[in-house]
Amino acid sequence: MAPPADRSMENDTVLVTKLVAEFENFGVIVDDLGIIDNLRAMCKLYSLDESSMVDEWMAFACSSGNDIEITHSALESFEKELQEKNTKMKQVLRKAANDDIVYNKDCVDQLLDREEHSLIDAYCTPEMKANKRLLKTPDSDSRKLLKTPLNRTPTSQIFSPNSYSPNMYSSRSNAGEVLATLNKCEINDGAINWIGCKAKIEITAADPQNSLDTNYRYMFQKISDRIEALRDQVRIIAESLQKEHGIEELGYADVPCQDNTTVIGRIGCDSNGRLNAASTVIAGYNSNRICRSAISLNVQELQHFSFFPGQVVALDGKNPSGNSFIASKLYQGIPLPFNKIPLETARLYYSNNDSPMTILVACGPFTTADNLLYEPLSDLLKIILNQEPDVVILCGPFVDAKQEMIKQGDVNISYEELFIEHLREIIDNVGRVSTSLVVIPSARDVHHDFIYPQPPFALPSNLKNAPEINFMSDPCTITVNDITIGLTSTDILFHMGAEETASPPGMSDRIGRLLRHLIHQRNYYPLYPPSEEVNFDHENFIEHGFMPMTPDILVVPSDLRYFVKDVEKCCCVNPGRLAKGKVGGSYARIAVLPPKASDQPVIDRMVSQIVRI
């Protein structure tokens, strides 16, 4: 038998390994031994396993507006918050233990209510308790956007390479490295040369009637209209769940019932903290009447579940007391069908039966954090000129509100002019090859409307009208010849991952679960209430935020680690950011081969890769 000291050391090693692996699932690389040791010590001190520690860190980073990368200064603030939570919890328990009041059956509810509110307060930060927030550009100060310092750098120096010493981006040595691959075909990855097939490309909205083409007025939402829009959002998903699972009659979650019944409703949290099994509530839906309020959801009988606020679910269970709905079965979500195109029509899009159609996807920011040279964008344009992909999809931000020089207002031209200058560069380069371009805005673009859904960019009047450029909204679903692509530049995976709770703890493939939620909820932002970073228009989201079909390719750019995954036969891609801090990031490239059979899924004739810029 191993000595106790050896066993303790072995347990520490296992904990550290699991901790590092869990952080890597969210794209956080922890390689500083000092940080690893501090995280291990905090796990022991506050009795947290590796999954809970990562959940706490992601919630802290999201609520405080910090980057998810762990630094020593951020770790100190994080530890102080954990310590404060622990101290408040001890005070609550000590106060309850020393309470001299004698409670009987008539007044014991007063004790339970007081303890419940005390626990909620212990987990809430002052920022979380704020009831109102201003509509503003994410992570930016309006005073900085309106004013710039008197001692700004001249424009000629900002855009002059001679004004900078060699930086981390230009000194990189691993450009072109393939970071991840998804190959569902029968051919070798090396057999694809990634040169476009030069076939005619047709790009259209998958649902033209509900596509967002122009600007709209926002900040004019009435409370009654917002409530109705939320009910419509639940109704759309509820009707599909009821139809697909053959649910004949819906019960009421908030009505006492001794027998099992089936209910549909929206998941919520009973406090301002992070969702967990104890704080889960459900706001029931029934077309016959509006439910009075959300009711506590007891999930102890469910062996497996994954919930997030705003999720619409169907459950079997009962409510014997009228105070809590006890769930015994969770119905699985049903994805929409794929877009089916006749085999003969699909083959017409490929001029050569052996040449694949190639798609390149890149997401901003397109310049590093320490300058406005847009070097990653220039390198990407060189790749486009060299490989001539059939389609290039560029997702914002193009003028990033989180970029240091933008935040400080250290620019001598307007943000609109900065965008036009680099849009002209993109048009001039892409116009030299037979490549079709799709451009998606981002809420982090300081020169554009920061509302969700976000209208597309308008082609500036001083730029020539290039027919191969397609400005689309965020989000949007488009068809490119015989395939369907879903696009959003909003980081829904990060926002949803910071709020999700799952059982049993430590379930594998968390990213896969989040992607599956998007597909099953049939829209691009199912989280409610939305993140503080997102200015959400509920009425327009009903029209423009839902998927008309399950896309063959779902592009979900995120600050989380890049990936390419097969989820429900949908190719889900996070290309990563083209520029990540002061260093280069990554982009995605996809090759779609001609179909061989009418029932062949698109993902089975597709090769997808994540490549370092």
Image (tube, rainbow, N blue to C red):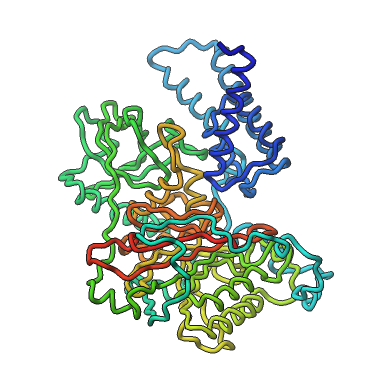
Q: Is residue 344 above or below residue 332?
A: below
Where is residue 567 shown, x and y percent of the image?
37, 52
Give the left or right position of residue 426, taking residue 545 as reference. right
Q: Is residue 509 above or below residue 584?
A: above
* Residue extending farthest right: 151
Where is residue 16 shown, x and y percent of the image?
60, 31
Q: Is residue 256 above or below residue 265?
A: above
Which residue lies at the image location 59% right of the left edge and 88% below the top edge?
Answer: 462
Where is residue 225 shown, x and y percent of the image?
38, 59
Closer-to-camera residue (413/249): 413
Q: Is residue 136 visible?
A: no
Q: How many marks?
A: 0
Where is residue 107 shown, x and y percent of the image?
42, 17
Quarter of the image with the N terminus is top right
Q: Is residue 264 above or below residue 612?
A: above
Which residue lies at the image location 25% right of the left edge and 39% below the top edge?
Answer: 252
Q: Quadrant of residue 206?
A: bottom left
Which residue lies at the image location 56% right of the left edge and 60% below the top edge?
Answer: 135
Closer-to-camera residue (295/165): 165
Closer-to-camera residue (247/598): 598
Q: Quadrant of residue 573?
A: bottom left
Which residue lies at the image location 66% right of the left edge and 66% below the top edge?
Answer: 367
Q: Quadrant of residue 449?
A: bottom right
Quarter of the image with the C terminus is bottom right
Q: Is residue 597 visible?
A: yes
